[in-house]
Amino acid sequence: MRRTVAALSAVLTASTVFVASAWPGATRAAAETSAAWPGATQATSAETLAAWPGATRAGTAETAAAWPGATRAAVAEPPAVPADLTSTEVSFRGGGGLQLHGSVISRAGAEKGRPGVVLVHGAGTGTPREKLLGEAVAFARQGMSVLVYDKRSEGYSLFERSYQQLADDALGAMETLRRQPGVDPGKVGLWGLSEGGWVVPIAAARSRDVAFVILVGANGLSPLRQQTWAVAAGLRKAGVSGSLVDRAEHNLYRVIADGGMFPQPYFDPAPVIGRLRQPVLAIWGVHDLLTPPEETPPIFAKALEAGGNRRYTFRFFPGADHAAHLTPDGGVTRLPELAPGYPELVGTWVEQAVSGRAPEAQVSGPAPEQASRTVAVPPTAWWESAGVQLVALVIFLVAFCGYPLVALVRRIRGRRGVPPVKAARLVSAGGLTAVIGGFSYLFYVIMTGGKLSEPGPLLAGRPVVWLALQAVAVATVVATALTAARWRRAATRGERVRLGLVVAGGALFVPWALYWGLLLP
């Protein structure tokens, strides 16, 4: 199975390379996984409230030898901070012995016994600490010491990651912050953005030393369901409808997950959230396009309440995006500025939480906007698995390439064969175009998906490229029927075998094209 997955990965990677050269912008990374990652009716704050149970970096890296078994991570230049703040460079050991580096940012002349918070990044490999410098500065000015670190790249990629290992990284950072001068070790908590919304609860459920939990843009659904929704929502926001968004995108993510190319696709965060005993502050921007902001909060509330934890505060910020930054266009563009009142809320709430006065079951702010509901993304059945998809691709290559290759060999050898069958030529060319072009365009779509996709020109809600591929698919099916009729009248045995191979490929193409939506409206 491992060889099958590797082979499928190679085929899909080749398709991606093809896309990158064919469409500008195709290499833009897929939208960051938030907490994964549409038709819902909007509820007022009061209605939503009632729906929730009980709601009213420094210097040079040390060598790996410094820590047995440790591996070095890349070291970046420490960030500059405003004059009213100080920055101390630290190094610590993360999951698997990886050495990580960060900065502890505090207010100049800050009082002793102050609380501290570790910032945990969202999705992305090797994300530098500067990515969260705005939050670190804002929280430090609220009287906290803030540790922000460079995210690991080793053991983390589009195809490999472990939320448990990332939680180890966060706990390593927290232990370092607890030892910093002036920081009260009993008042140190964790803050997680997006993917960090899965990581931080794992870490907090493991350690009683975590004093509080802050989550921004977190998600209560599985990563695969979130990401599938985010890309589909981006397509719909761009005006796309029909089989591309309703079937093809959805199925592609399922096959990718089955092929082992989507890490921890079915991770369920709810049980972990239910084990949290710390005060929880969860924040969502009203215009979150990467996490389903209407569906997620009730999941959090239900899990916390089931675990007996009512010390939670949920806040929705108007005019804010997935990261609680201001957005001028409904969440598509992220401005550097944080939502007004966000840092102050964090500062006030942390002070309450570490003093034992955390609010209970508080929900405030305008109702979030979610244009469409998420849908379940179940594992593939055997007949639609990554292995079967790979076998189908191999059959298509052999069947559709065989006809022209035989003709080429005959021409090179100077042999005169029977006249070519135009319909068979069409099956060969059309089948290859639909298969390679279909996968290439699908990968382009998911690589540029999220927030606002770039599907290209549309016609009646369908991307022109997708419509062209559908037309080619229909032509391939018709040509297959015509070739089958000609196959019965083939003059020689060799020609019957040659045409039979094309017909077999065309016959298999029909259910394949239906599965991927190429033969659906």
Image (spheres, grey):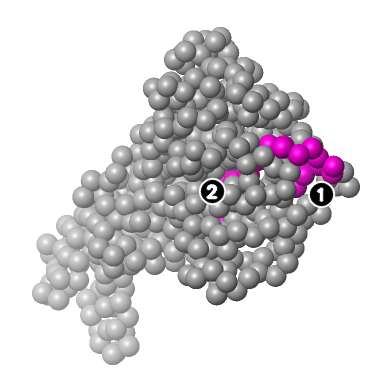
Residue nearest the observer in this picture, 509 or 233: 233
State the SS at label 2. helix
Quarter that holds the N terminus = bottom left
Which percent across, then down, holds residue 508?
Answer: 22, 55
Residue nearest the observer in this picture, 184 or 248: 184
Is 177 situated above or below 184? below
In magenta, the rendered stretch is: 105-127
In the picture, the disc for residue 171 is 2
Quadrant for residue 425, please give it: bottom left
Dot 2: few (<14), some (14–19), or many (≥20) neighbours within 10 Å?
A: many
Is 297 situated above or below 37? above
The verdict on residue 162 being magenta is: no
Inspect the image, locate mark 2, and give the three-letter code of the amino acid beneath it: Leu
In the picture, the disc for residue 429 is none
Quarter that holds the C terminus = top left
Which percent across, then down, holds residue 193?
Answer: 59, 40
Which residue corresponds to mark 1?
A: 86
Inspect the image, locate mark 1, and give the three-letter code of the amino acid beneath it: Thr
